[in-house]
Structures are given as C-alpha cells and as structure tokens.
Image (spheres, grey):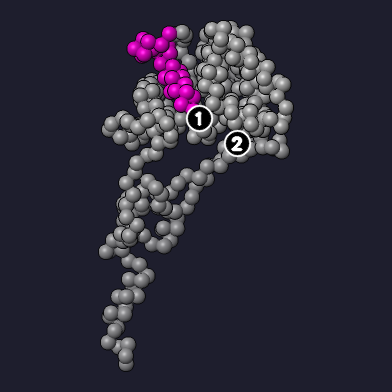
Amino acid sequence: MFTSEKGVVEEWLSEFKTLPETSLPNYATNLKDKSSLVSSLYKVIQEPQSELLEPVCHQLFEFYRSGEEQLLRFTLQFLPELIWCYLAVSASRNVHSSGCIEALLLGVYNLEIVDKQGHSKVLSFTIPSLSKPSVYHEPSSIGSMALTESALSQHGLSKVVYSGPHPQREMLTAQNRFEVLTFLLLCYNAALTYMPSVSLQSLCQICSRICVCGYPRQHVRKYKGISSRVPVSSGFMVQMLTGIYFAFYNGEWDLAQKALDDIIYRAQLELYPEPLLVANAIQASLPHGAMKSSKEGTRCIQVEITPTSSRISRNAVTSMSIRGHRWKRHGGHIGN
C-alpha cells in the first residue's frame, strides 16, 4: 500500500471522529464521490495484516449504526470484499487475522435482524402467480383462458414465504457461518440499485474466486493467493446469483458472465439443485449479444409486451357469452 493511499485512509479516520452531528448528512452525501478513498479502503481490506484494518472495520461499523442511509450504503458496498476476505482467511485456517472483519460482519448482521425498536424482524416475500399479468408475461400467452371462476380463483392465490426471526450471533462458527453470510448478501442485494460499479465488480470477482479456488478451474482463471477449497451453501450461491443477474444489465457483462459460468461449475460439482436451476434460468434469459451500452446509468431488461387487447379464445365460455347465446335463441319471443 502506497504512502499516499495510507494518508487518505488515516485522514478519513480522523475526519469522522471530529465531525459534528449536524454535519453528518452533508458529509454522508459527499462521501460517495471520493473514489480515491474507496479504492484505498479496498486495498486495506485486501491486506489482512494491515495495521489500518481494525480501525477501518470499526469506523465502517460506526457508519452502519449511525442511522444515516448514505453511510449505511457506503459500508454495504464493501460487503462482498469483506465476505471474501473472511472466507479466504477461514479456509487458510488463520482465523486470528480475521477477527475485526468477523466482528464487523456480525455487527451488521445483528443490526439487520431487528427493527428500530429492537424486535426481531420477519421478512415476507410474495411469490408471483402466472395467472396474473406482469411486465414479463400475460396469462393469455401461456395457456387457454377457458377456466371456471372457481378454478381461476384457486389458480390466482398468492403464496407468501416468510424468513425469520433470525437469532442473534456472538461469533461465527462452522455451523452458523453461511446462515449469517447468506442473510448479509440478502441485505446487500436489497440495496443493489445504490451500489457503485466498483462494488458490482468486486461481487463478480469474489463469486468466481469462491467457486473455483481449490479446483482445477483455478489454474484456468489464474487466481493466485489461497489454493484451499472454500465451502459454500446452496442458499448462499442463490444470493450470489441475484447480484450477478443485476450486474449483467448494469455495466459488468463480462465479469458477470465469468461469475455465472463459475457458479454453474461449482453447483454441478456440489450437486446443488437450487443454484443450478436459477443459474440455468438466468443463462437462458440472457440476450445473444453482450450489452454494448455505457457503464453509467441503470440498464433495464428488454421484454416484449403483448397488446392489452383481450385475447379470449373463441371456445372460452363466459357468463356474457351464455347470455348472448340465450338472447339469440329466444329473440323471436322477446317481443311477444
């Protein structure tokens, strides 16, 4: 690490300590534009033996619990790199050098599992129904609309999946490690739209490294550093894929493609059905050519929206068609 980069980090550490509380919002807004600081902090995190690592982790945690949204997101952008450094150190069994990173990860986890009143959170997710239209499809394009009212009401029921409450953790162990890390990636994915490109690049790179280290593909990728295999869970890989899918359409096509290939490679070796299903679905949905647009701004997925005009089958029997049929049949007797 260069002396100039070390000076930037040390100035950042001392600046926040003397900052009055009234200046916090303005400070948080300007912080995201300091690219030299962000790159210097990445280098500190990547050096487990750095003397600055502990104060940096402490200040990132102070940012997270400050309650300021911009400071919280500033800490979140380093989450993929922090997870990789922790897993790399754990795989090399040199756990003593990852103590401050582990404390930061645990601190963020314990803050996220409770609300502002200190009560445990229960997250809910509504699974979309194919019987209801969305920006991706219309029910009429999938199958016949000739359904009875009873069948349609049953077919359109929304299913809600709940996650939580999550227990507080005082330390990371082999038993709870991926429960905590998976939840942390879930929190990161919830803020993906606010993450800068350097964070998305870090996410793609650490996903590749986690999946191939210790396997023959590591030599193909020419990844140096640890050669030990990094354990992963099925749920953790699914959360990695969520971020990778976003990176495809937000300026990181090449890195995301490499990461997706490596996740499929590892999921096949581990025989994990969930990440294989999600990864193959992502791969099948990708356009044939790479996204050529610039890296600035948010990309969107191009989908073909069918016309909004009704496409009811001629054979579909509805209450209106029944009434119309009855009127035609008895039309001659209406005037009598």
Q: Quadrant of the C terminus?
A: bottom left
Picture residue at 72% right of the left edge, 21% below the top: 18
Q: Main secondary structure of the magenta part?
A: helix
Question: Residue 146 occupies which quadrant of the picture?
Answer: bottom left
| Viewer-nearest residue: 266 or 35 | 35
Q: Is residue 260 magenta?
A: no
Picture residue at 47% right of the left edge, 8% below the top: 226
Packing grade of label 2 (10 A; few <14, some 14-19, many >=20) is few
Would you say residue 195 is visible in this rendering? yes
Residue beneath label 2, please?
A: 164
Percent x, y for residue 255?
Answer: 38, 23
Q: Quadrant of the N terminus?
A: top right
Percent x, y for residue 119?
Answer: 69, 37
Residue 305 falls left or right of residue 104: left
Would you say residue 260 is visible in this rendering? no
Residue extent of the magenta highlight: 196-224
| Label 1 residue SS | loop
Q: Is residue 260 above or below residue 330?
A: above
Comes first in the chain, label 1 or label 2: 2
Res 195 label: 1
Percent x, y for residue 219?
Answer: 36, 10
Q: Amino acid at mark 1?
A: Met
Separation of residues labelled 1 and 2 (CA atoms): 25 Å
